[in-house]
Amino acid sequence: MLLRRVAAALCAALALAAVQVAGTVPASAAARVLYYDAGQAQEFRAVVDQGAQIWNSRAANVRLQPVPAGRTPNIRVYADNGWPRTYTTSLGNGRWYMGREAVDDGYYPPRIAAHEFGHILGLPDRRTGLCGDLMSGSSAPVSCTNANPNSTEVAQVNANFRTSVSVPARTFVWVAPATARS
Ligand SMILES: [Zn+2]
């Protein structure tokens, strides 16, 4: 009797574990993996990883991972003294720059990193001026330290990778063209 009860409890525990596995594995198995190379991001390597983690913790359909040795990355990240900017070639592919011009002005580096990854994930600039929007970029106050995409931005990225939408090659610059100093 006791043995049967223990066995029943064990079965219930196993069933629960199976449900949990079933609930998580298909989602991550379906996620499209994009490899990024931060090897040339200089002093911003950690912040690039942080930007990737922000997306990984929110968007279920895509996963940003450091490129393994010997593999061609989907995304290359650089650093220079210009404005942060992204050059996309297609959805999930391209290169972006961590520009010191914005960092020196006081913009929050993790927000810049997550924003530029956002372009690679198919999001355009939306200069709403709102700190709660990741893709508002430099239109939000310099003091804005929100590095998280809002629910609409996350939903858009998930939708992009669910259907592998076609995204044209484009260039996005951190500052609006009218305010760019160079
Ligand atoms: Zn942008």
Image: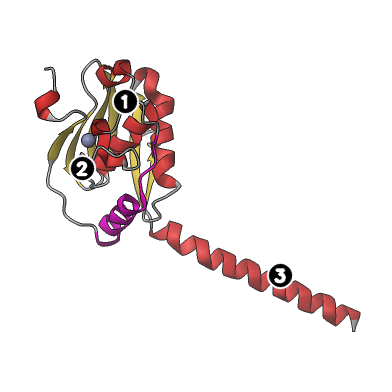
Measure how far apart labels 3 and 1 are at the Cα level: 50 Å
Quadrant in which residue 106 is drawn: top left
- Confirm or deny contact between disc 3 and disc 2 (CB under 8 A): no
Q: Which labelled disc corresponds to residue 13? A: 3
Residue type indicated by callout 3: Ala
Could you say which disc has been placed on residue 142 in the image?
1
Measured as percent of width and height from the top left, residue 2 is found at 90, 79
- Sequence-wise, the earlier of marks 3 and 2 is 3
* Residue positioned 45% across, 47% down in the render: 57
Q: Is mark 2 within 8 Å of ligand 1?
A: no
Foreground of the two, 83 or 64: 83
Q: Gap between marks 3 and 2, in whole Å?
A: 47 Å
Could you tell whether 35 is left or right of 88 in the image? right
The verdict on residue 158 being magenta is yes
Q: Is mark 1 within 8 Å of ligand 1?
A: no
Graded by Cα atoms within 10 Å as few (under 14), some (14 to 19) or many (20 or more), the crowding at tag 1 reads some
Q: Amino acid at mark 1?
A: Val
Q: Residue 146: x percent and y percent?
A: 39, 36
Q: Position of residue 1 (x, y in %)?
A: 90, 84
Q: Main secondary structure of the magenta part?
A: helix
| Label 3 lies in ligand 1 vicinity (Cβ under 8 Å) | no
Q: At 13% from the left edge and 17% from the top edge, which residue is drawn?
A: 181
Circle 3 crowding by C-alpha within 10 Å: few under 14, some 14–19, many from 20: few
Whole-angstrom CA distance, mark 2 to mark 1, is 16 Å
- Residue 72 seen in the current view: no
141 in the magenta segment: no
